[in-house]
Image (cartoon, rainbow, N blue to C red):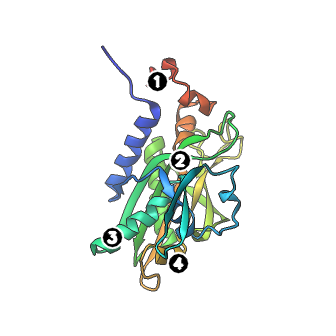
C-alpha cells in the first residue's frame, strides 16, 4: 500500500533543508498565541487594523498577563513572526550567545473571505537573523539563495520600499520569474517579476522586546507564503484545492 505526502508538507521539508544548509535552525511555536507575542512585542500599534475582528481570530474568554502585569488576550497567530520574539527571549533566558539564525514554517490564521488566492488558514515561513554583522546585503543574498534552491534555477530579487511595523526599513520582495527569467510570461503577467514576500531590518523596538540590546546587535527578517510558493511551482490555480482533502491533488506528489 502506497501513500503520498501533501505538497505543503513536502514544501516545508524542502524549505527547512535549504535553510539548514545555510546555518538556520528550523523552529516552531504555539498556534494559539498571546497578544504580546503576536502584536505588542512586534511593534504593532494597539489601533492597527490587523487587530480588528475582520483580520484576527480572537479567542473568547481566554485572557492572560504580559511581562508588565497587564491583561492580554489570545489569538490564533496571524503570522509566524511570533517566533522572532519567542526565540530571542529563549536565547536571553538561557544565556546563549548570538547570532540567532532561524526559519519558522507553520500554520497561520486570518479572518478573511475565502477565494482562489485567500484562505482563513494558510502557511508561512519566517526567517530571522540577529547578529552584529546583519545587513540588507546579507539578507538579499540569503533570500536569493533560498528562492534559487526552491525553484531550481538561479534567481535574483529586488526590494521595493514598504511599511511593516516590525522592520525598518521595510521592503516588499519581488522574485525574478523562475519560468521566463525576466522576459515575461503568463506566470509573472508579462512583467518578469513576482511579488513574493516582505522583509527588512528588524526594528530596534522588536529587538528590545526580545531582550536584545539594539545598540550592539542588528537583525533582518523575511517572510512569505508557503501555499503561494507551492501554487507557483506546481501550477495550482486555486489555494482551496490544497485544503479540499481531494486525494487526486495529493496523489500527484
Residue sitting at x 47%, y 78%: 208
Q: Where is residue 51 in the image (x, y as percent from the top left)?
A: 65, 58
Q: Which quadrant is home to the N terminus?
A: top left
Residue with the mark numbered 1: 250
Q: Residues within 10 Å of mark 2 (few under 14, many from 20)?
A: many
Residue sitting at x 44%, y 39%: 11
Q: Which quadrant of the view contains residue 127?
A: bottom left
Quote the CA–CA distance across marks 3 and 1. 39 Å
Quote the CA–CA distance across marks 4 and 3. 17 Å
Q: Give the mark, 3 or 1, whose residue is nearer the N terminus.
A: 3
Which tag is nearer the camera, tag 4 or tag 3? 3
Q: Give the mark, 2 or 3, whose residue is nearer the N terminus.
A: 3
Q: What element carries label 2?
A: strand
Kindly identify which numbered label has been placed on residue 108.
2
Quote the CA–CA distance across marks 1 and 4. 43 Å
In the displayed structure, would residue 70 be above or below residue 124? below
Q: Where is residue 168 in the image (x, y as percent from the top left)?
A: 59, 73
Q: Which residue lies furthest to the bottom in this view?
A: 215
Q: Are marks 2 and 1 in contact (CB under 8 Å)?
A: no
Q: Is mark 3 on a helix, strand or loop?
A: helix
Kindly identify which numbered label has been placed on residue 91.
3
Q: Residues within 10 Å of mark 1 (few under 14, many from 20)?
A: some
Amino acid at each position: 500500500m502506497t501513500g503520498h505526502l501533501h505538497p505543503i508538507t513536502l514544501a516545508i521539508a524542502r524549505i527547512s533543508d535549504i535553510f539548514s544548509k545555510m546555518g538556520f535552525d528550523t523552529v516552531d511555536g504555539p498556534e494559539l498565541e498571546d497578544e504580546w507575542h503576536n502584536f505588542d512585542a512586534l511593534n504593532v500599534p494597539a489601533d492597527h487594523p490587523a487587530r480588528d475582528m475582520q483580520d484576527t481570530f480572537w479567542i473568547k474568554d481566554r485572557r492572560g498577563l504580559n511581562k508588565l502585569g497587564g491583561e492580554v488576550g489570545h489569538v490564533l497567530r496571524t503570522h509566524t513572526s511570533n517566533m522572532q520574539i519567542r526565540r530571542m527571549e529563549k536565547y536571553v533566558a538561557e544565556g546563549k550567545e548570538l547570532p540567532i539564525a532561524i526559519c519558522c514554517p507553520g500554520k497561520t490564521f486570518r479572518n478573511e473571505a475565502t477565494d482562489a488566492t485567500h484562505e482563513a488558514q494558510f502557511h508561512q515561513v519566517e526567517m530571522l537573523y540577529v547578529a552584529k554583522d546583519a545587513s540588507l546585503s546579507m539578507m538579499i543574498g540569503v533570500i536569493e539563495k533560498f528562492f534559487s534552491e526552491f525553484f531550481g534555477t538561479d534567481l535574483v530579487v529586488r526590494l521595493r520600499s514598504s511599511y511593516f511595523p516590525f522592520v525598518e526599513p521595510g521592503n516588499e520582495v519581488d522574485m525574478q520569474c523562475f519560468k521566463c527569467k525576466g522576459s515575461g510570461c503568463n506566470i509573472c503577467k508579462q512583467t518578469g517579476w513576482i511579488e513574493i514576500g516582505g522583509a527588512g531590518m528588524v526594528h530596534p523596538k522588536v529587538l528590545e522586546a526580545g531582550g536584545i540590546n539594539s545598540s550592539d546587535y542588528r537583525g533582518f527578517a523575511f517572510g512569505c507564503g508557503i501555499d503561494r510558493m507551492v501554487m507557483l511551482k506546481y501550477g495550482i490555480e486555486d489555494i482551496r484545492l490544497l485544503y479540499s482533502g481531494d486525494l487526486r491533488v495529493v496523489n500527484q506528489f
